[in-house]
Image: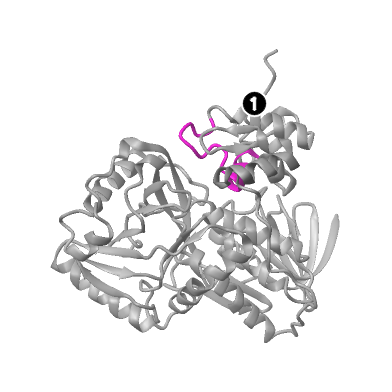
Amino acid sequence: MLSGHYDIVIIGAGVVGCAIARELSKYKLTVAVLEAENDVSMGASRANSGIVHSGYDAKPGTAMARLNVMGCAMYGKMCDELGVAYKRTGSMTVAWDERGERMLQELLGQGVANGVPDIAILSGDEARELEPLLSKDVTAALYAPSCGITNPFQLTIALYENASENGAEFFFNAAVKKISKSGDVFEISAGDTQYHSKYIINAAGIHADEIARLAGDDSFSIVPRVGEYILMDKDALLVTRPLFQTPSAMGKGVLVAPTVDNNIYIGPTARDTTDKGVYETTAEGFLKLRELARMTVEAIDTRKQITGFAGLRAVSGEDDFIIRDFGGMIHAAGICSPGLTSAPAIAQEVRDILSGMTELIEKEEWTAKRIPIPKFESMSDDERSRLIYENPAFGHVVCRCETVTEGEIVEAIRRGARTLDGIKRRVRTGMGRCQGGFCAPRIMEIIARETGLAMTEILKDGEGSNMVVAPTR
């Protein structure tokens, strides 16, 4: 059995695990990240709303409230450093009756207590001045100008790339099966490798309770909450900011919101499950989304749907994030919404806990900047010409819906993508109207050419998702 020795082992390569890896890469530490899947951003980080929440939902005094507001304030600088799309759009939470308006007043009070800047309640008419297609039945809205939107999986990938550039090591297909401790050193069995470290950071998402139990901590449990979404074509663009409905005990309610790539989506539903592997969508869920979305925007045309998807949120019974030490294992668990927003602040919180356990010495050289993959679609004609002159592969458009070139696909492979969805998350191939119906075979050819994989070995995403099983001729 192979073995490796590190100061820190992080379990989980979602947005929280990758944000922690980037934060700790600033210090003279050896850091390993173990991920059970074949890529980063394979859990909640690949299928969520992409909202950078302002912070009025969380109960005042909780870690969730504090880290949400702190994380939201960090996004502009972080996304600029990492070359990730981010728009500060503001958001509105809408009400239709007196009961809803009372709830908005409660949320306003929470927002003020949490330190959310410039939050205010608008009348229905004032809200429609900002969003003209808002339903005529909306009587009031809570406006939070600090809210924003980003791309959750591209952010996770950027954090991973920057952490790697700064020395963190990532290991994939490395599901943790056993944790033991000898003296003050953890022994972690993952795949065919034994990892040794003085500290573990548990950022395993919906599996964080299982990881905790491997270390002898059964103090919390994680319940997966399924959320279904409908994504619509770009010509369905109706709104310029996330529009929430008044929340329930199950979550923040159904959104009608734009993405940073100019699609519109509606969702999510909220349904607790015991199955941590369920990502299925349902006709009932989609029907519910369509009905609820029309309460916010009557004119929404769900015939523009190009796909639907589901994600899982990690919900604990503590009604707060679980960020604490257990004998050298630091949990970053129960990170449901607003986990994406809070991720950079959670990383600093974990760093601070760690600094009370061991000395952290900053590196003389650390780079905050990450160079993104060139995005051909958004370039001017002059920029495109220069890029094609330098590399003719950027002159070959492979994904017509999103105008993604061969050069972008090859760069995604060079940075670690090995599956169709791994490339999709990096450069948006297959995210347009045809959903990969035309470009997938060509992308598979490029993967095979660049990696040496046989066509039968190429996966759509996770284990067992082989695209073809045998040649026909």
- How far across and down, in percent of the image, does residue 66 sit? 46, 79
Specify the segment rendered in magenta: 418-436
* Image x and y of residue 128, in percent: 22, 59
Q: Is residue 303 above or below residue 148?
A: above
Residue that lies at the very extreme toward the right in this rendered image: 2
Q: Is residue 433 magenta?
A: yes
391 displayed left or right of 426: right
- Quadrant (top left, top right, bottom left, bottom right) of the N terminus: bottom right
Residue, x 14% and y 68% (percent of image)? Answer: 98
Residue depicted at x 54% and y 52% = 46
Which residue sits at x=24%, y=72%?
121
- Tell me where residue 284 appears, x and y as whole percent: 31, 41
Question: Residue at the spot x=64%, y=26% of the render?
Answer: 468
- The image quarter containing residue 283 is top left
User: What residue does disc 1 label?
Assistant: 468
Looking at the image, residue 245 sits to the left or right of residue 384; the answer is left
Q: Is residue 220 left or right of residue 117?
A: right
Q: From where the camera sits, is residue 185 visible?
A: yes
Above or below 47: residue 306: above
| Secondary structure of the residue carrying numbered label 1 | loop
Q: Can the viewer see residue 462 in this picture?
A: no
Q: Position of residue 297 (x, y in %)?
A: 25, 50
Mark 1: amino acid: Val
